[in-house]
């Protein structure tokens, strides 16, 4: 892992201008990513984790708009590029894998053709060359008999196989950053483990940087190096996975971890975070978690800074849990 | 372990409240008349038969929770629908409190059928989007004469309170609620006819973690208060471990292992259960190298011969590909459908 970040996101803010008002789906999000690192972005639905991924890719569609902040990749400021320049970056320097491969793949094109389109967008290539590259890429992601599958259509493959194809396509132009948005959520446990094992191997071998967006803390625990926990459009806690899971600083992270069954004694009542996530149209002033937080005080009506709580760790809270983990 | 009554560990136990006996369900895709004519001329056309559930026997004691786990396509939802009396099995029988509810025997009493209810995964798909909450909850009890029209508002408000919703929800429509609240409405509807047996088919799979905890807590307290017997279907081993007394693991239409929850998680005996538990996502386990079982679930249209799991099994032997293993009884009331569980012939014999 080199020290120079491949991707640097600072104060990224994305707003959706709706009839009902302006929704700040991504609010002042900052993080950086190094080669060979997997950063997990975890949050519940509506927390802004997917929009963060789309904002980095420059794929936010109107009425959504990146209103401020900067995304810098290998020295280039992506947020300053126009659409034509961005198209040259997307798929070559930075690629995305989505949750549902059936909506990513074109249903009327063969697998080989889909590879060809992605390759040809960035360099001159013949169909014959594209087939060679595709077969090698599919073998790398663990598809058996890749040559026979080249002429298959997406619907002829299983869900796990389709997701493997999407990952292979994202890799063919050797991007330095891959954003994976819930790539295993729709898959069964044994297939999910196969895909995660493959992602782990590829990130290590190719030394790419990956943002892994998920709602599942246990996947983050098994796969990621660092994690950012999102709530109400903000990253409320950021740092190394093992430290945050063992000793969370933000009350939201504490609550999330306590509400997961499996580690609690059987049939004990699970911890419930009171209330529900606020609408991004109507976030509380100050700390957006304060209306559900057991530690909330008057101070929380002013927005807490994203302050360091330990070496390499930041949390957005006025009252972070004591380091050492003996806090009530 | 010996001081525990072994009653519910035997399928023949008399104390079982809900019982499935050798239940099978086949879905047949018939060929058209043209194809049938062509088949007679020697072309290869035949009816497609999916054996969704094969020879499943389960017994759930009164007031207990049985977890049914498996991956998509293994037949767990079909089995759940059969247990709730929504689907008729192709063979076998389902009984509750000694009375048949599978609609295969002579006519079933509607009152008995009402005692088995179901909670579905996606409340948006299982609640009528044009029905107000009060109607959703009172439609069934009114139709069956369990309550009087005059009591309907009070009754609906009571059910709502029971699942943790305020009475101002009565006149709202399903889309006006969040996912967790909708699931509460689905539960209230199931409870409206005072069931004894609840089949919950992935009731928390579509919910966020913090909401999941609320619904699991609600189900546990309802189960205790109403002495409900529950068949809890899920692919999430963490949830099942937390909630269930006993667990059945399903693979390609068959139960491959049954055991008490604690025993199953402590030492799984079937290789498929072992593989599932190995890959069980856990926050505590920390970073790890994934070592998944290879291959995908075969199509139920064309299951492999012998043990259905043998093409993916690390411990597969020669006989596994030809002979299907029966259920072997193991200590602690555990049963596994695997040749490895076969008791060694006793030395005296």
Image (cartoon, grey):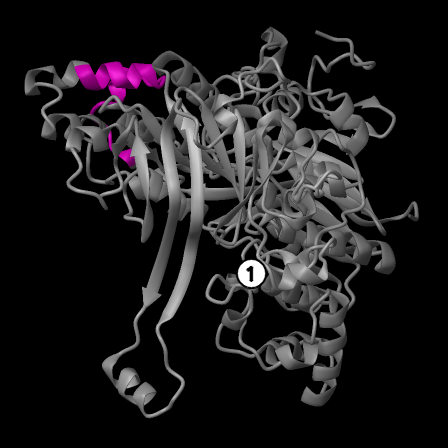
Check residue A116 for magenta coloring: no
Residue furthest to the bottom in view is B41
In this view of the protein, can residue B16 be seen by the observer?
A: yes
Most extreme residue toward the right, as rendered?
A: A2
Disc 1: host chain: A
Q: Residues within 10 Å of mark 1 (few under 14, many from 20)?
A: many
Residue A11 appears in the figure: no
Query: In the rendered view, does A229 fall on the left or right side of B120?
Result: right
Question: Which residue is found at the position 78% from the left and 66% from the top?
Answer: A174
- Quadrant the C terminus of chain A occupies: top right
- The main secondary structure of the magenta stretch is helix
Establish if A25 lies above or below A297.
below
- Residue at the extreme front of the image, as rendered: B348
Residue A132: name its quadrant.
Answer: bottom right
Q: Residue at x 71, y 35 (%)?
A: A228
Residue labelled with disc 1:
A159
**Residue A286's x, y, as percent?**
58, 20
Looking at the rendered structure, the number of numbered marks drawn on it comes to 1
Whole-percent x and y of residue A147? 68, 81
Residue B260 placement (x, y as % from top left): 57, 27
Report whether A25 appears left or right of B24: right
Depth order, front residue of B142/A225: B142
Q: Is residue A318 above or below residue B139?
A: above
Q: Which residues are magenta?
A: B155-174
């Amino acid at each position: 892992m080199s020290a120079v970040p491949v991707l640097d996101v600072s104060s990224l803010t994305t707003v959706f201008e709706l009839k009902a008002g302006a929704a700040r789906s991504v609010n002042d999000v900052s993080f950086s990513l190094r080669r060979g690192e997997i950063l997990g972005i975890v949050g519940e639905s509506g927390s802004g984790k997917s929009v963060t991924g789309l904002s980095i890719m420059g794929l936010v569609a109107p009425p959504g708009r990146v209103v401020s902040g900067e995304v810098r990749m290998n020295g280039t400021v992506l947020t300053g590029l126009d659409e034509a320049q961005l198209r040259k970056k997307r798929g070559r320097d930075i690629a995305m894998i989505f949750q549902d491969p059936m909506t990513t793949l074109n249903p009327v094109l063969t697998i080989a053709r889909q590879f060809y389109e992605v390759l040809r967008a960035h360099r001159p290539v013949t169909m014959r060359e594209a087939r060679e590259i595709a077969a090698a890429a599919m073998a790398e992601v663990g598809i058996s008999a890749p040559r026979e599958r080249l002429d298959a259509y997406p619907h002829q493959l299983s869900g796990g196989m389709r997701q493997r194809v999407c990952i292979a396509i994202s890799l063919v132009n050797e991007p330095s950053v891959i954003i994976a948005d819930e790539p295993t959520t729709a898959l069964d446990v044994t297939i999910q483990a196969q895909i995660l094992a493959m992602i782990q191997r590829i990130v290590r071998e190719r030394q790419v940087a990956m943002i892994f967006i998920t709602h599942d803390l246990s996947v983050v625990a098994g796969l990621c190096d660092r994690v950012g926990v999102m709530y109400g459009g903000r990253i409320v806690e950021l740092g190394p996975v093992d430290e945050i899971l063992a000793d969370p600083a933000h009350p939201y992270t504490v609550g999330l971890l306590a509400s997961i069954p499996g580690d609690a004694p059987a049939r004990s009542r699970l911890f419930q975070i009171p209330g529900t996530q606020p609408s991004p149209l109507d976030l509380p002033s100050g700390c957006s978690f304060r209306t559900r937080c057991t530690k909330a005080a008057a101070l929380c009506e002013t927005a807490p800074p994203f302050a360091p709580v330990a070496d390499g760790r930041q949390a957005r809270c006025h009252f972070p849990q004591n380091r050492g983990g003996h806090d009530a | 372990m010996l001081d525990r009554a072994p009653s519910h560990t035997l399928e023949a136990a008399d104390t079982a409240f809900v019982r499935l006996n050798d239940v099978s369900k086949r879905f047949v895709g018939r060929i058209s008349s043209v194809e049938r004519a062509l088949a007679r001329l020697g072309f290869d056309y035949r009816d497609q038969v999916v054996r969704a559930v094969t020879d499943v026997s389960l017994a759930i004691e009164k007031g207990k929770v049985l977890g049914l786990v498996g991956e998509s396509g293994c037949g767990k939802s079909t089995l759940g629908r059969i247990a709730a009396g929504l689907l008729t099995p192709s063979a076998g029988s389902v009984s509750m409190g000694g009375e048949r509810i599978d609609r295969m025997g002579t006519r079933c009493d509607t009152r008995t059928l009402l005692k088995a209810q179901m909670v579905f995964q996606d409340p948006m798909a299982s609640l009528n989007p044009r029905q107000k909450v009060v109607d959703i909850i009172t439609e069934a009890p009114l139709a069956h004469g369990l309550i009087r029209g005059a009591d309907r508002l009070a009754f609906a408000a009571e059910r709502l309170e029971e699942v943790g919703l305020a009475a101002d929800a009565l006149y709202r429509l399903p889309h006006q609620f969040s996912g967790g609240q909708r699931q509460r409405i689905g539960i209230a509807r199931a409870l409206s006819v005072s069931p004894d047996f609840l089949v919950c088919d992935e009731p928390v799979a579509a919910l966020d973690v913090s909401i999941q905890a609320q619904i699991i807590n609600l189900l546990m307290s309802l189960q205790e208060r109403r002495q409900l017997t529950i068949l809890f279907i899920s692919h999430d081993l963490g949830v099942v471990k937390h909630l269930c007394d006993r667990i059945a693991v399903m693979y390609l239409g068959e139960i491959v292992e049954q055991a008490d929850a604690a025993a199953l998680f402590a030492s799984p005996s079937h290789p498929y259960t072992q593989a599932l538990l190995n890959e069980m996502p856990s926050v505590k386990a920390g970073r790890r190298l994934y070592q998944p079982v290879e291959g995908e679930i075969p199509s139920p249209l064309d299951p492999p011969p012998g043990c259905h799991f043998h093409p993916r099994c690390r411990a597969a032997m020669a006989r596994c590909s030809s002979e299907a293993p029966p259920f072997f009884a193991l200590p602690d009331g555990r049963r596994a459908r695997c040749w490895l569980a076969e008791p060694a012939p006793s030395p005296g014999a």
